[in-house]
Image (cartoon, grey):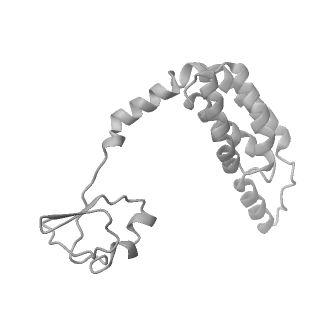
Amino acid sequence: MPLPIELLLLAAVVGPLSAVINNTPVVAMFIPVVERWCRRLGVAPARMLMPLSFMTVMAGVATLLGTSTNLVASSLCEQLGYGSFALLQFTPMAVLTYGCGVLLLALLAPWLLPRGEAAERAQQLEAGYAIHDYLSELLVADSSPLVGQRLDNTLLQRTFDVRLLALIRDGERFSLPLGGQVLQGATCWW
């Protein structure tokens, strides 16, 4: 269970960064750091990652640079003749809001966020979706643009991250390697 101390420590690091860098890259940079930290603490990552996301959003409004919404609002105000916002115009109210939000997170997160070990929750997720046993059979329709193309010339494996294990044509099964096989259409019954 993350203690409020850990959440406050995370807030102290993430807040100033999110004020000057867009919140999405800040979250992306801190995901691996927080996951390693959670592993050391023996805490489910959701207990820290969700507050991380909330903290970056709250801190992002502190300056004109922190979120694209502030830039759009500033530009729109300038176009309407009201003038643009100053770089730190939002900061006083944002610091107050961020402080209250972090305090609320530190108090409520330990009771509202999921409990349990990270590895245990990952195993539950994998079991629930049967990720390790996922296998599909694809049928190439006669009208498909794939008909007549060699497998290694299609984008199936590179673009869609599909791993082809076999090709079945007229009841005959072709095994790996399949790159030179030409795709043929099949009549669809739906």
For residue 140, above or below residue 22:
below
Picture quadrant of residue 39: top right
In the rendering, at what x and y percent does residue 21 appear? 77, 50
Q: Quadrant of residue 94?
A: top right
Q: Residue at x 80, y 53 (%)?
A: 64
Query: In terms of depth relative to the viewer, which is nearer, 5 or 163?
Result: 163
Q: Toward the viewer: 176 or 162?
A: 176
Q: Is residue 154 left or right of residue 136?
A: right
What is the number of callouts on the image? Answer: 0
Residue 70 as seen in the image, left or right of residue 109: right
Closer to the camera in the image, 108 or 9: 9
Q: What residue occupies the far bottom of the structure in this picture?
A: 148
**Location of residue 37 with respect to 169 vertically, above or below:** above
> Is 149 left, or right, of 50 in this rendering?
left
In the rendered image, residue 126, in percent from the top left (x then y), is placed at: 39, 36
The picture places residue 80, in percent across and down from the top left corner, at 77, 66
Q: Residue at x 81, y 66 (%)?
A: 81
At x 54%, y 27%, the residue is 44
Image quarter in which the N terminus is found: top right
- Which residue is painted at 30% across and 43% down in the image? 133
- Whether residue 97 appears in this view of the structure is no
User: Would you say residue 93 is visible in this rendering?
Assistant: yes
Occupied quadrant, residue 168 = bottom left
Residue 111: percent from left, percent from top: 56, 18
Q: Quadrant of the C terminus?
A: bottom left
153 w.r.t. 137: above or below: below
Tell me if 81 is positioned left or right of 168 in this view.
right
